[in-house]
Image: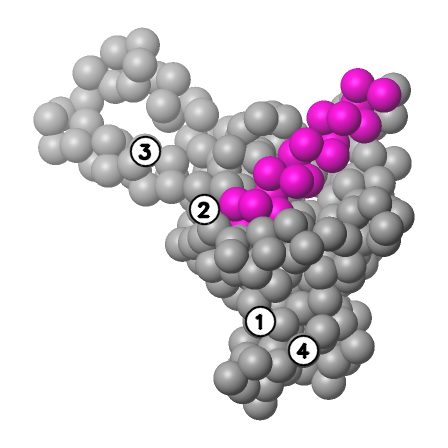
Amino acid sequence: MSKEKEITNEIVSELVTTGVAVGHKRSKTHPKMKPYVAMTRNDIDFIDPETTLESIDEAVKFIGERIGPDDLVLCAASTAPAHEAVLAFAKQFNFPYVTTRWLGGTLTNFKVISERMRYYVDLKTKKEKGELEKYTKKEQMKFGEEITKLSISFDGLLRMTKLPAILFVVDPQANETAVKEAIKLNIPVVAILDTNDDPRTVTKPIFANDHAKQSIAWVMQKITEGIVAGRKAGVK
């Protein structure tokens, strides 16, 4: 990314007004994040705009190079501010997603998780076809409750018929279990992370505010635009 072309006062202002550049209190800044802090105002550290823009470009390039026609990115965003933007991103590219509590073993115990997903799909299909009507009303009610419960855990994962090529997370601390499972299986992790995070814990850090809805939406939009542009240009 060309600094002369991209780092303008307008973009810097946009990063500040959307909250993208706004980190945490200086006392909470991780030592390894200090090189990426541009300044401190009222005890709040601000992320360097050039660092943010370059990290977005690098993440988009990494995803484009890693993802083939049959590969998947698993998106994990357990915090409320990230739900809407990450869900829109996942649905646009038909990626599996988790926007509720991470189910332990989603990656490291994928065989068992897959069996549970098949059971859920089978049970839901039977209900839709009326095949559960042969049971008592009490039993049907229990099946209905089970379907509702399973839907919360598995609806976003049904696209994941195999392990993902990349795990994408917003806030690696909030999604610590997911990150650890990916690392254990050598699945690269792309993450939006803030000044309180250790960037060494992920493969491709995106330096931005990871706790504000507007900031996350802005970053996710830029990533979406980058992937779409890359595909149009012939990047897989």
For the point 74% across and 34% down, which residue is it?
Answer: 226
Quick one: label 4, few (<14), some, or many (20+) residues within 10 Å? few
Mark 2 or mark 3, earlier in chain = 2
Quick one: label 1, few (<14), some, or many (20+) residues within 10 Å? many
Foreground disc of the pair 2, 1 = 1
Mark 4 or mark 2, earlier in chain = 4
- Residue kind at label 3, given as amino acid type: Ile
Q: Which residue is mark 1?
A: 23
Q: Nearer the viewer, residue 14 or 179?
A: 14
Whole-number angstrom distance, CA of label 2 to CA of label 3? 22 Å
Foreground disc of the pair 1, 4 = 4
Foreground disc of the pair 3, 1 = 1
- Residue kind at label 2, given as amino acid type: His
Q: Which residue is mark 3?
A: 147
- Residue kind at label 1, given as amino acid type: Gly
Whole-number angstrom distance, CA of label 1 to CA of label 4? 10 Å
Q: Which residue is mark 2?
A: 83
For the point 17% across and 32% down, which residue is it?
Answer: 141
